[in-house]
Image (cartoon, rainbow, N blue to C red):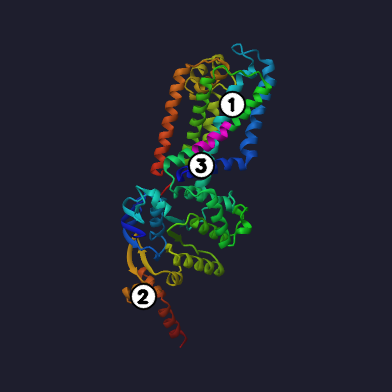
Amino acid sequence: MSAAQIRFFTLLRREVNRFLKIKRQTIGAPLLETFLYISVFGAALGSRIDKLHGIDYVVFIVPGLILMAWAINAFSNNSSSILQQKFQRAIDDQLSSPASPAELLLAFSLGGFLRGMLIASLTFLAASVLTDLPVEHVLVLIPALFLVGMFFAQLGVLVGIRAEQFDDVAFAQTFILQPLIFLGGVFYSATLLPEPFSTLTHFNPIYYMIGLVRYGFLGYSEVNVALSLILLTAVTSALFLLNLRLFRSGYKLRA
Amino acid sequence: MTALQVSDLTKRYPTGTEALRGVSLEIQPGEFFGLLGPNGAGKSTLIHCATGLARPTSGSIRIFGHDAVDHYEQARIAVGLAPQDLNIDWFLTLEETLDYHGGYFGMRRKERKERIAELLDAFSLTAKRNDRTRTLSGGMKRRLILARALMHRPKLLILDEPTAGVDVELRLELWHYVQRINQEGTTILLTTHYLEEAEQLCDRMAFINDGRIVAEGTSDALAAQYGVASLEDAYLELVGRKELSRGILAGDSGEATS
């Protein structure tokens, strides 16, 4: 391996080891949360709800739960990791190393991306055992999940850079991200909502992400799949470029 | 080739504070150089600009010929920084702290392992290698920070107030260690508030005040420049507190008791 490769893998190893060291919090808790969602919404409530668009209710919600697991974990990992290292000024060790802004950004991004992927994969495995979860369009599902993971990883980096206290991260997650995910249609179909809520849902970007992932798994979608993929690629790229600019300028990282 | 060449460096913070106002400085390879000045004089800002932790507003910094701002990779490989703040990740072990640092500088696993063992031994930290850094005492954290700065074998070691708040034993231990690596060829830039430390260790030193280098030379040359007998008196002249001179205080005391 070249010196640059060793450097990048060390930056990434640090981020991965960080969440593996606190597995109960970073892996165990999200898995338990997803299991509870499947149990409560799927088994308990689902037994009283008939099929949605011809799909069992518990199966209908699983794609959204997988997306939610990936999104929230990618976001919270990156925002917390960056803020914690800024808070302790431990991040100075990376910032004063020969690592480029792009290497730093990619390593921080992939840390959360991989944590989200791990939890989403475990959720998928558990859901496959508990339900008859199909995978109808794998060529849509893989890029959709990749883009969703990368979008929230970038969002976590952005919030982590901007944050000055842990309350800033908690605010973004509790008051912005989670409501958008819940109201994006993880647990229901937007077509069932009365007006104006049905129309309002179309202004929620996460609605389109859930639509894409649900199409990948179930073959059912309320959104234009091609257009949603293009738009998701565009906003994820825009976020990456914004973060790269922040790392290059040293915004809230370097004096 | 000059170890550190700073030319007309300015640093203005977004708040408008001008921390550096046209600093120029040269440190030769193998030198032990002291940078002295009161709090807020610009010492740490200068160090941060040289190590990539702050962005200069104008001017240039070259480390062993490499531009530290635009072509920073080689410049940063040449520098090791032991900062004033104990900026270590509380959740890492000592070994991980050094291992990651070595990795950032492209050191291979075998080389990292050997260097970690060598440094932990040199700083009497081997028994703590698997402990988390938050469990260390202040003195041990200070040693770890110095070990981390040396991990990638830098040619220029920057020590930003390395002995602030440490006990006499550790201070002497650190002095011996940095003197030894200086004799082995490492260039050292030291900032300190302890003038006896600067006199004991440094070949040459500079006074920085209000973002400007105001005097530079050996301890004797600085005293001569201010027309006083010691480095301490020269420093007191610099900060405008010559009434605190030991000579004057001794004289006052003598008058009071006679």
The kind of secondary structure element at disc 3 is helix
Q: Write down the region rendered in magenta.
A: A108-117
Residue A63 relative to residue B180: left or right: right
Image x and y of residue B32, in percent: 41, 66
Disc 1 from disc 2: Cα separation = 71 Å
Disc 2 from disc 3: Cα separation = 50 Å
Q: Which mark is residue B220?
A: 2
Point 37% across, 59% down: residue: B3
Which chain is disc 3 placed on? A
Q: Nearer the viewer, residue A163 or A18?
A: A18
| Residue type, mark 1 in image | Ile
**Tag in front: 2 or 3:** 3
* Residue A8: in magenta span: no
The kind of secondary structure element at disc 2 is helix
* Residue A110: in magenta span: yes
Q: Nearer the viewer, residue A248 or B122?
A: B122
Image x and y of residue A138, in percent: 54, 20
Residue at image mark 1 = A66
| Residue type, mark 3 in image | Phe
Point 64% across, 32% down: residue: A31
Q: Which SS type dominates the magenta stretch? A: helix
| Residue type, mark 2 in image | Asp
The kind of secondary structure element at disc 1 is helix
Residue at image mark 3 = A9
The answer to whether residue B58 is seen in the rendering is yes
Disc 1 from disc 3: Cα separation = 27 Å
- Look at the picture and state if B246 lies above or below A40: below
